[in-house]
Amino acid sequence: MYFTAYHTFQLSPLLVTRDFGYDLLFCRLQNLEFGVMGSQPHVLVVPYPAQGHVAPFMKFSHRIVDHGIKVTFVSPEFIHERLKTTMPMKSPIRLVSFPDGLEPGDDPNDKIKLINSFLEVMPGHFKDLIEKINESDDEHIGCVITDGMVVPALEVAEKMGIKMAVLWPAGPATLAIILSIPKLIQDGIIDIRGTPLKNELIWLSKEIPAWTSTKLPWSCPGDSKRQEFLFRHLFRMNHFVKQCNWLLSNSFYELDSLALNLIPEIIPAGPLLLANQSGSHIGSFWPEDSTCLSWLDKQPVGSVIYASFGSTSIFSQQQLDELALGLELIGQPFLWVARSDIINETLTKFLYGFRTRIADRGRIVNWAPQEQVLAHPSTACFLSHCGWNSTLEGISMGVPFLCWPYFTDQFQNKSYICDVWKVGLGLNPDENGIITRHEINIKIKTLLFDDGIKTNALKLKEMAKKSVTEGGSSLKNFESFIEQIKH
Ligand code: UDP
């Protein structure tokens, strides 16, 4: 039986979300009182600070609280501020933020610096938070859930003897190759910075797609600083992924049993989707423009091209022009998510003229309620960068893909979409590395007339649904995980 007790927490440097009943109030706590549930099991959820990690972790957190487990969601201030503006006022998740660790004069737009400084300062705050919660008679942190890349959180949990769950938010094949990094180095295939030493295909098994040396999960074409940063984190997480008590995956067994079988301890519990398609904004960094849903209502069934490239893809001006002109050339309705930071130059001026030209059939938004868009009957296909969340969302809604990967695991996800599951087509750049308007136009038309791809997409949709409904493989795995962390 649960009961409510009230305790005084001394969390002076922390920014904490207070949860009175279900009303969220955001405030900086300096020796403030708030209520906590008595004997309720309690977990700390700590995603890597990026949109593609925070979104599935927030969905997972909601599923956990639905089972009577208390969740405290930890993020740096720069993420917390964004979540505050987009989260619904009524939420059962308690948000806690830690300082970013930036020194005066540091550039807050330097993402690498920001994440590094946060990871440096977070262990002290994290340990304090756990100790404060554990000091109370009726509360105890039973488990820390992170995605493997927040190594400092795992180090603290390991030292304090707290159980660790790693929820891997990307594909299982990607995790399999990351777990092979020590062997790839030992075999002279890559060096200790992740740079390939040979220009050859890397096979983990003959049954899953190979990686080319320039399309590894840490490959960031044209940005060696980011590539090294990413590789360092992926390399470090190896130890903890092997030590953790649970290794969960945002995938489902029937989708990719061959890659999942390469990681014997993995527990597939996906796809992680919004529990309720009418609820949105869960874990979004930008406010969603839901007016596009009423616009979709007015479009013919199966007519709209949805174009969205996740939270980090950046286009050159020339490439953006070709994309816009390609969407215009197709002559069908389209919904395009053009984030304000999708190019380094200013977007507004360029889009102004374009918007006027395509006003009768095109809609451009800064951020969309993506799952709802993909589930809408008017949506015909998904022009996507193939981030893992977008991939699973498109699969779960039965939407065919036109693939335009940008970096990291997106290349491998594209191989799965086009060559393994056969639910999409890829776009090929020209000799100058540009994906032209003509390529976009031709491929979209080919895709829309491909009945085989449509049939495969609908089959995968059914499989995804089955895995998370009563008796399904992912639901069973999730329920078993919940039972274990409750006891
Ligand atoms: N997303 C969204 N609205 C948009 C574009 C994306 O809600 O307009 C969500 C999308 O549903 C997904 C996440 O942002 O859950 C992006 O994650 P993904 O792994 O696809 O790409 P990343 O942003 O990590 O590159």
Image (cartoon, grey):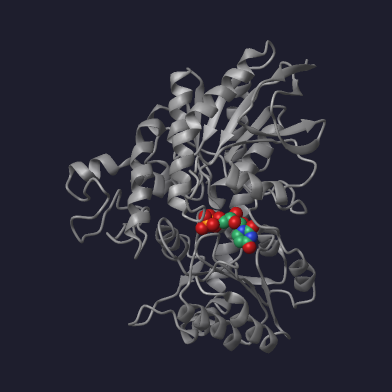
Q: Which quadrant holds residue 429?
A: bottom left
| Residue drawn at point x = 79 percent, y = 76 percent | 298
Q: Nearer the viewer, residue 401 or 198?
A: 198
Left or right for 88, reference 95: right
| Residue drawn at point x = 50 percent, y = 85 percent | 437
Left or right for 146, reference 97: left
Direction top: furthest residue:
137
Residue 21 showing in the rendered view:
yes
Report x, y in % for residue 314: 48, 67
Q: Which quadrant holds residue 199?
A: bottom left
Report x, y in % for residue 278: 78, 54
Q: Nearer the viewer, residue 370 or 351?
A: 351
The quadrant in which the C terminus is found is top right
Report x, y in % for residue 192: 23, 45
Q: Give the tally of numbered discs.
A: 0
The quadrant in which the N terminus is found is top right
Determine the quadrant in which ligand 1 lies.
bottom right
**Considering only vertical position in the picture, is 66 above or below 415?**
above
Residue 487 showing in the rendered view:
no
Q: Nearer the viewer, residue 455 or 227?
A: 227
**Considering only vertical position in the picture, is 220 above or below 466?**
below
| Residue drawn at point x = 72 percent, y = 27 percent | 68
| Residue drawn at point x = 40 percent, y = 31 percent | 240
**Considering only vertical position in the picture, is 12 above or below 351?**
above
Left or right for 97, reference 113: right
Report x, y in % for residue 110: 46, 54
Q: Which quadrant holds residue 302?
A: bottom right
Left or right for 441, reference 8: left
